[in-house]
């Protein structure tokens, strides 16, 4: 009989062709499911560039640290720190806090005790509970009633136009104002 000797061309191709090479119909898409599209930050429309906010580092009130502070960002001291602080940001000394060392920062706000010099600052604010024993060199200085200062103050002078050296007894006097 010829039935056994006849070959089926479709069957022969299916046997000779490897399974990965056979064409298969594409899977049917599930139309009930729509993938969520969430905006991604790197594909979002560009927004106006804002200045990044500087991070703040805190020395807590129950800490006593000895060393050196250097870096960018803001520093808030509520405990005790012995050493120099040089930051490209703001430095604030909380009420009850104490810093023994020199300070360099953009803005220095003092409500606690500083034993050392403020060597370079754009702005210095002494709050009513502040106590400073040391020299202050700043662009502007704000002194609240009740604060204490013992040292020399250079304030409001541009670099290169420093005043002639004068002796001071540690007391500041305000210029007379016309009525």
Image (cartoon, rainbow, N blue to C red):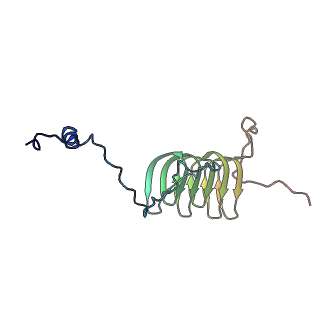
Side of 51 where 155 appears, left or right: right
Compared to residue 120, the image places residue 160 above or below, namely above
Q: Residue at x 19, y 40 (%)?
A: 12
Give percent across and percent down for residue 24: 31, 47
17, 137: nearer the viewer: 17
Q: Residue at x 18, y 41 (%)?
A: 15
Give percent across and percent down for residue 98: 52, 57
**Residue ranking furthest to the top:** 160
Q: Quadrant of the N terminus?
A: top left
Q: Residue at x 23, y 43 (%)?
A: 10
Give percent across and percent down for residue 94: 56, 61
66, 23: nearer the viewer: 23
Side of 75 where 173 appears, left or right: right
**Residue ranking furthest to the right:** 179
35, 50: nearer the viewer: 35
Q: Residue at x 69, y 62 (%)?
A: 144
Q: Quadrant of the C terminus?
A: bottom right
Side of 81 where 90 appears, left or right: right
Side of 124 where 114 appears, left or right: left
Give percent across and percent down for residue 35: 45, 58
**Residue ranking furthest to the left:** 1
């Amino acid at each position: 009989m010829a039935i056994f000797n006849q070959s089926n061309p479709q069957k022969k191709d299916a046997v000779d062709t490897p399974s990965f090479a056979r064409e298969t119909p594409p899977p049917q898409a599930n139309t009930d499911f729509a993938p969520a599209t969430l905006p991604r930050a790197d594909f979002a429309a560009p927004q106006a560039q804002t200045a990044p906010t500087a991070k703040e580092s805190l020395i807590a009130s129950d800490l006593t640290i000895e060393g050196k502070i250097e870096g960018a960002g803001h520093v808030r001291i509520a405990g005790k720190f012995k050493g120099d602080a040089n930051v490209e940001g703001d430095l604030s000394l909380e009420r009850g806090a104490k810093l023994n060392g020199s300070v360099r920062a953009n803005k220095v706000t003092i409500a606690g005790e500083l034993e050392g010099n403020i060597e370079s600052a754009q702005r210095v604010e002494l709050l009513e509970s502040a106590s400073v024993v040391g020299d202050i060199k700043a662009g502007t200085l704000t002194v609240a009633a009740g604060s204490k200062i013992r040292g020399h103050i250079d304030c409001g002078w541009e670099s290169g136009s420093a005043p002639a050296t004068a002796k001071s007894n540690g007391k500041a006097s305000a210029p007379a104002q016309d009525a």
